[in-house]
């Protein structure tokens, strides 16, 4: 018995000396080595090995790394889920739908601007043509982003609609919606440009979800023109935004329009860049008194 054990160990030792590691990491299992072949280079997978009398055999391997958990939004239910499930058949598998109260936000990541526009129009029509939906939803907002392009103007609204609309989240939603965006008006007038309609819809959606709070709409101008003119035009423009929101269902009592003219500049430089930065609309959320 002792002789056999000694012989087995000797054979194992001889076999071990005939195996040379190749270096580098590999997932390949070790290959059997013929005794007469001389030293060989084989790839060894990381793990524990034992000698089975003819070759080294892996007895255990490190546990495979687990992929990182991916956070996903729960599947929509009811008519929202039913409508959302029609989008892939319509050619828009990337499009989703968020609904909270009277506000619906079409979301997703479109491959290009044309697909975004087509997807939004198809989704909007599907919502407006559905009798069950029409009685609940009064505002459809564009929250669709474009791959390597602009983010959806209703992106922050969609996030707000998924949780509690407290004062902090409402303020953050207004700020994010207005980030790098400007409500455009016709020159020297308080008429909102049609190009800003979707931005106004997104802001109105935030106001609809947050009208339990007081919302101030503050209009600001650049330093060109007289102080009196700038105060008047900024007041008129903030009132135009307020009127738009009221027309789309926001409680009038929640909204206050203020015109600050040129009195609160963000940049005091007399440059085109500074003037563009100072011409703005700001939204402030606070508790109702």
Image (spheres, rainbow, N blue to C red):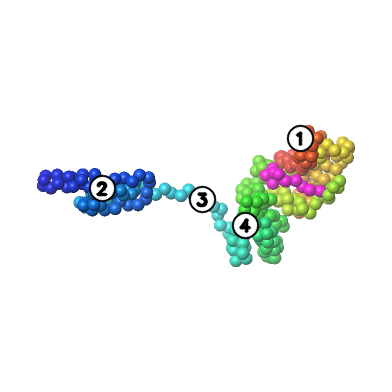
Q: Which residue is mark 3?
A: 70
Give the mark, 1 or 2, whose residue is nearer the N terminus. Answer: 2
Q: Are marks 1 and 2 in contact (CB under 8 Å)?
A: no
Mark 1 Cα shell of 10 Å, populated few (<14), some (14-19), many (≥20): some
Inter-mark Cα distance, 1 to 2: 76 Å
Residue lying at 71% horizontally and 39% vertically, measured from the top left: 286
Give the mark, 2 or 3, whose residue is nearer the N terminus. Answer: 2
Q: Which residue is mark 4?
A: 111
In the rendered image, the vertical position of residue 12 relative to residue 79, given as above or below? above
Inter-mark Cα distance, 2 to 3: 47 Å
Provide the secondary structure element on which disc 4 rests: loop
Mark 3 Cα shell of 10 Å, populated few (<14), some (14-19), many (≥20): few
Horizontal placement of 94 versus 233: left or right? left
Mark 2 or 3: the one toward you: 2
Mark 4 Cα shell of 10 Å, populated few (<14), some (14-19), many (≥20): some
Check residue 33 for magenta coloring. no
Inter-mark Cα distance, 3 to 4: 21 Å
Q: Going by the picture, which residue comes out furthest to the top?
A: 268
Inter-mark Cα distance, 1 to 4: 37 Å
Provide the secondary structure element on which disc 2 rests: loop
Q: Are marks 3 and 4 in contact (CB under 8 Å)?
A: no
Mark 3 or 1: the one toward you: 1
**Residue 270, position in %: x, y?**
80, 35
Mark 2 Cα shell of 10 Å, populated few (<14), some (14-19), many (≥20): some
Q: Which residues are magenta?
A: 174-185
Which label sits on residue 39? 2
């Amino acid at each position: 018995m002792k002789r056999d054990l000694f012989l087995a160990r000797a054979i194992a030792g001889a076999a071990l000396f005939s195996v040379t590691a190749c270096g580098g990491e590999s997932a390949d299992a070790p290959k059997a080595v013929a005794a007469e072949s001389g030293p060989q280079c084989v790839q060894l997978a990381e793990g524990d090995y034992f000698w089975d009398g003819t070759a080294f055999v892996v007895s255990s391997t490190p546990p495979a790394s687990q992929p990182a958990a991916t956070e996903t939004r729960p599947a929509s239910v009811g008519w929202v889920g039913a409508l959302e499930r029609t989008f892939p058949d319509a050619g828009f598998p990337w499009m989703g739908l968020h609904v909270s109260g009277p506000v619906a936000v079409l979301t997703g990541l479109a491959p290009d601007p044309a697909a975004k526009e087509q997807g939004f129009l198809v989704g909007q029509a599907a919502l407006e043509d559905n009798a069950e939906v029409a009685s609940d939803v009064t505002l459809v907002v564009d929250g669709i982003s474009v791959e390597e392009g602009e983010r959806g103007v209703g992106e922050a609204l969609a996030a707000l609609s998924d949780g509690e609309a407290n004062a902090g989240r409402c303020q953050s939603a207004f700020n994010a919606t207005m980030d790098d965006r400007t409500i455009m008006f016709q020159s020297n007038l308080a008429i909102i440009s049609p190009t800003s309609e979707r931005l106004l819809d997104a802001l109105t959606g935030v106001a609809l979800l947050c009208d339990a709070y007081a919302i101030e709409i503050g209009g600001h101008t650049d330093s060109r023109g007289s102080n009196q003119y700038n105060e008047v035009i900024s007041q008129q423009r903030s009132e135009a935004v307020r009127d738009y929101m009221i027309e789309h269902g926001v409680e009038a009592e929640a909204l206050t329009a203020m015109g600050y003219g040129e009195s609160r500049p963000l940049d005091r430089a007399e440059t085109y860049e500074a003037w563009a930065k100072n011409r703005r609309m700001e939204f402030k959320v606070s508790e109702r008194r």
